Image (cartoon, rainbow, N blue to C red):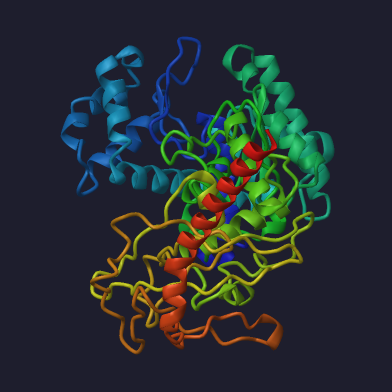
């Protein structure tokens, strides 16, 4: 089958593959999954789609791995190939083999082999069948592919033939009704088989729920109903190369909702939100990024919402996600220039919808205020050849009608590690700047060398003001040195305290003398 015949996008095919992986191994791509049950007719099974021992799938997969150049554990597996080819069920409980299978899953060669094996032996035949039926929806392809993986489409149980006998041949005209009838027929057959097959009806129920919800194009996020919980399959559960922006990935309109719950399995979308929060210093970058958005994550997000003047719900919906993305961009790629006028001229966002107005939010503070709330410090510049100059930021301009807080000690602007050093010194762009660490501060006696094209400002003079948009926003301090105070004024400041003390003493003496005369 040529690639031109495949009318599904790479993202849709990856989503289909991830859904089936969830059914097989409770994860979108768990290469080390091993299952073995005495009641399972397939015997020992391995990989993200569970290649079974009985039937030869496991042998073919491991043989392909051993024949692939660079396979790290090829020699260890070769001694097992004869028993695998024979379908020896004693391998079901071979602890050494099970440990080897799990270890080999860490080898990138094994991961690539699994992807190629399941694509060539299952996905491509499933796509051919989908096209021969005239199906055009990605969900129909997922139903067929899942049947090819479990082995009940047109071989063995021949669920396709059973469905044709009930409702007729499949076609583009009756695609949705036919798929629904096929799922009902397949479910009834699995229940009739008992044991492990009867327990696998959850995959039929999950696909049926997607059909009833009308999720025919499999637009992310996709809620996949597992046993006793729902896994929200999102863009962050798939490979980053599928997206033009590996961080934000999809339109925020399709982000969905992340809220505190007792998550059984780690989800990519939860981990993505926690990663953004960790970058802002709101959660621990190790313990707080586990893919399970629970009560602790929700409380930390409430603190973030409080710092932004947004309702403290602890729920990351579309608007809250946009707010988080905006703060993250300010943190990793702060606006250039002095003063808070730069906050009104953010650089183009990495996603076209990040700069839209936010519902329920008042003044949007920068990442510095968020980091200050969490006790974080500004990151040092990644440029070693061009140290940033120490500058003093001009007084901030109020973003709203409320008075702006007094300026705090300046902090060095955080620069994106992927971009070259800026050609002009950057100042703290937020209303509540974060104090720089001692390693970041430059001694007043030895000012840091300035970048090219812009002289560095000393610790005793203020940085030149940023160009103002209008007279109402012009607040930059003048760089002119004030005139020296007259000599008599300095002398007066030294004498006046002593004159005041003398007057107080004289007043006390007069009071005491007056009382004595009264007596």
Q: Can see residue 167?
A: yes
- Between residues 194 and 28, which one lies in front from this camera angle? 28
**Number of marks present in the image shown:** 0
Residue at image coords 59%, 51%:
507
On screen, residue 89 above or below 235: above
Point out residue 290 in the picture as x, y percentages from the top left corner. 48, 35
Residue 158 x, y percent position in the rendering? 65, 32
Q: Residue at x 63, y 27 (%)?
A: 157
Most extreme residue toward the left is: 75
Question: In this orientation, which residue lies closer to the viewer: 423 or 252?
Answer: 423
Asked which quadrant contains residue 207, the reply is: top right
State whether residue 500 is above or below residue 429: above
| Residue 47 or residue 268, whichever sits in front | 268
Judge whether residue 135 can be spotted in this image: no
Horizontal arrangement in the rendering, residue 388 relative to residue 327 (left or right): left
Q: Is residue 433 above or below residue 211?
A: below
Q: Residue at x 32, y 62 (%)?
A: 441
Left or right: 513 in relation to 387:
right
Q: Quadrant of the C terminus?
A: top right
Q: Position of residue 338 (x, y in %)?
A: 51, 77
In front of the other: 181 or 201: 201
Spot occupied by residue 39 in the image (x, y as percentages of width and height): 50, 10
């Amino acid at each position: 089958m040529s690639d031109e015949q495949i009318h599904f996008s790479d993202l849709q095919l990856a989503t289909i593959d991830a859904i089936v992986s969830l059914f097989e191994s409770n994860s979108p791509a768990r290469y080390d999954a091993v299952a073995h049950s005495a009641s399972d007719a397939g015997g020992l099974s391995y990989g993200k789609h569970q290649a079974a021992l009985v039937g030869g799938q496991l042998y073919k997969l491991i043989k392909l791995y051993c024949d692939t150049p660079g396979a790290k554990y090829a020699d260890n597996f070769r001694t097992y190939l004869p028993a695998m080819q024979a379908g020896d069920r004693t391998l079901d409980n071979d602890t050494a083999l099970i440990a080897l299978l799990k270890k080999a899953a860490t080898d990138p060669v094994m991961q690539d082999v699994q992807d190629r094996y399941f694509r060539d032996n299952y996905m491509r035949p499933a796509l051919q069948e989908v096209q021969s039926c005239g199906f055009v929806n990605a969900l129909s392809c997922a139903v067929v592919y899942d049947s090819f993986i479990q082995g009940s489409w047109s071989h063995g149980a021949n669920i396709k033939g059973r469905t044709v006998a009930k409702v007729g041949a499949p076609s583009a005209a009756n695609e949705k009704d036919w798929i629904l009838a096929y799922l009902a027929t397949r479910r009834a057959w699995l229940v009739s088989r008992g044991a492990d097959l009867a327990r696998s009806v959850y995959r039929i129920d999950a696909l049926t729920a997607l059909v009833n919800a009308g999720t025919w194009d499999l637009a992310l996020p996709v809620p996949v109903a597992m046993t006793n919980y729902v896994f929200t399959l999102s863009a962050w559960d798939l490979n980053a190369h599928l997206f033009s922006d590996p961080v934000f990935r999809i339109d925020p309109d399709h982000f969905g909702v992340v809220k505190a719950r007792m998550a059984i399995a780690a989800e990519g979308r939860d981990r993505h939100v926690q990663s953004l929060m960790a970058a802002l210093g709101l959660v621990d970058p190790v313990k707080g990024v586990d893919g399970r958005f629970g009560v602790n994550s929700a409380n930390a997000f409430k603190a973030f919402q409080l710092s932004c003047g947004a309702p403290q719900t602890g729920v990351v919906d579309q608007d809250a996600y946009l707010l988080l993305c905006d703060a993250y961009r300010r943190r990793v790629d702060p606006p250039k220039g002095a003063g808070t006028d730069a906050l009104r001229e953010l650089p183009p966002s990495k996603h076209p919808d990040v700069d839209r107005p936010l519902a329920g939010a008042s003044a949007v503070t920068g990442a510095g205020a968020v980091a200050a709330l969490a006790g974080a410090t500004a990151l040092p510049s990644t440029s070693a050849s061009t140290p940033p100059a120490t500058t003093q930021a001009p007084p901030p301009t109020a973003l709203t009608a409320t008075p702006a807080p007094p300026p705090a000690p300046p902090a060095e602007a955080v620069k994106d590690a992927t971009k070259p050093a800026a050609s002009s010194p950057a100042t703290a762009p937020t209303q509540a700047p974060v104090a720089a660490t001692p390693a970041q501060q430059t001694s007043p006696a030895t000012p840091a060398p300035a970048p090219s094209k812009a002289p560095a400002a000393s610790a005793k003079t203020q940085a030149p003001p940023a160009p103002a948009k209008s007279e109402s926003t012009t607040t930059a301090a003048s760089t002119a040195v004030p005139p020296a105070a007259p000599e008599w004024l300095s002398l007066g400041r030294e004498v006046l305290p002593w004159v005041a003390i003398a007057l107080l003493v004289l007043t006390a003496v007069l009071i005491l003398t007056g009382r004595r005369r009264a007596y």
